[in-house]
Image: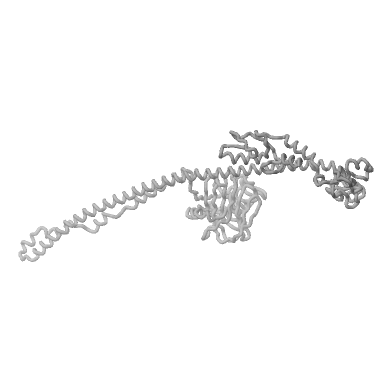
Amino acid sequence: MASSDVRCKQNCSICLSTYIDAVTLGCGHNFCRVCIHRVLDTQDEAGVYSCPECREEFPERPVLENIEKCYDAVERDMSTQPDPEEITGILCTYCIHSPVPAAKSCLLCEASLCDHHLRVHSKAAEHVLTEPSANLEVRKCDIHKRGLEYYCIEDAACICASCSLTGKHKGHQIELLDEALLKKKKWLRNVSDNLLAKREGNVSRIEALCKHITDVHERAQATNQSISGLFIDIRRQVDDLEKVVCSEISRQEEQMSLSVSDLIQHLEIEKDDLHRTIVSFQQMSLMRDPIVVLRNQELYRYNTGKIDTCTEDDMHTIGDLDILPISYMIHRAMRRIIEEANSRGFREPTASGILLDINTAGKNVAVSDTFQMASWSEVSPNHQATSKTFQSCQVLSINYFSSGEHFLEVDSKAGGDWCVGMSYDTIDRKGERCIIGHNDKSWGLRLWSNQYSVVHDSRVVLLPVQPSCKKLGLYLDYEAGRLSFYELSDPIRHLHTFSAKFTEPLRILCWVMGSSLKFHRGSLVLLRKILDNTKEVQF
């Protein structure tokens, strides 16, 4: 019972295991450092700290102190504790009248002896004494039936003296069991220390991940607040824009109504004048006196075409609603809204145009006059080799990408093999590691024997999709560390996304063999379609 109490004092009352990196509270109770840290972390919100064992409260978070002496106490206690065989009650074989605990066991006699019988026991070398054990056979050599005295280092086996002299362990490096035990314990302590460090590393990583989750939550809340403020401003600006546009439409409507009213009034007057003139002409046409008819000045005015009357052209001068200023106001306001969104960090990705750097083109790579297409050529083009020129059939772009989001399109020629992606400018220009994807400075999508694969740092991963389109899309989000490839088919198909922490500016890099790749500015319509469907894409 006393032994059980001692062992309880060596165990942490939280995890119920032997102390690991033991610490003590002010009340004197001991715990594992990690265990008590977790308990105190849960008490942080309440602001009241107490010992998990005695419930003594502390006004502030208690300072934890190391207990190096606890380890010594555990080791001393464990060294004084009886072996499991003793606890089971190994008794002296010769004390038949009353049970007496055995002090040693003799492997030759296969008997256990108390202190009294041990004094009269034979001291001959063949009588090997060991700690009391109920099963003495396990301490004997299976072949020679002698006590195990040595440890074979080469075979990692416990052996007897005969095994080391004549058996299969002859000539092997051996040592006494006690020496081997000390080395084994030292090794176990080293392994335990390493495991403890690894466990603490796991705890640190868990804490870092929890902190990351908290940081993401805080950033999400801040982003939500920023978005809410942005949309409040957008709604206000849209409401103001609606009022201005509606006011402009009403102004144009009112102006046209006044113009039409004036024209109608003019036409009404003219209509009445025409009516009177018609009646006068009809009356005059009935007259028989030529002098009266021929001298009539009104008749002369109409006859010479000098009559002032409204025509169809007057209708056109009135016009219709003028949409141009309305459209201008709408688009100008929309641009202001986009500029405001950009100023708050919500930038729209740009569709990038690509120009190839002929100074980096390998000897079998032909670059078009527009510097937008790279083709494989059996006849080496007349490139002037420089320190930037690749030894392989590939070429870099002039364009650099060191921030933001970018989208571009690539057309591939039917037949042949190719690889396209992005690379740091510091990529090697010679040797096998200069090829795209065969180093840690480039990321590529490859078509080889009509099979898609992605390659980075010499690791090739086959993609479980068959090529169905000759047009590709590349989408780079530099800050997010994301490079995605798409087939611009209908519907658009996501092929693969690399995730990395980019540390240098990126350039487009392509490799061609019996094929060609043409780069051009990406379509913003396709880009928006891709971004709208990112929830369906499994990155």
Q: Where on the picture, by quarter, is residue 416? A: bottom right
Q: Is residue 412 visible?
A: yes
Q: Name which residue lies at 56% across and 39% down.
A: 46
Q: Where on the picture, by quarter, is residue 56? A: top right
The residue closer to the viewer here, 513 or 215, is 215
The spot of residue 218 in percent (x, y) is 53, 43
The spot of residue 213 in percent (x, y) is 57, 45
The spot of residue 235 in percent (x, y) is 40, 47
The residue closer to the viewer here, 171 or 334, is 171
Q: Residue furthest front?
A: 97
The spot of residue 417 in percent (x, y) is 61, 58
> What colour scheme was applied to this rendering of the protein?
one colour
Q: Is residue 6 left or right of residue 520?
A: right
Decide: is 30 above or below 492: above
The residue closer to the viewer here, 248 or 209, is 209
Split into 4 quadrants, where in the image is the N terminus?
Answer: top right
Numbered label tally: 0
Q: Name which residue lies at 53% across and 45% down.
A: 217
Decide: is 272 above or below 85: below
Decide: is 488 above or below 69: below
Q: Is residue 377 visible?
A: no
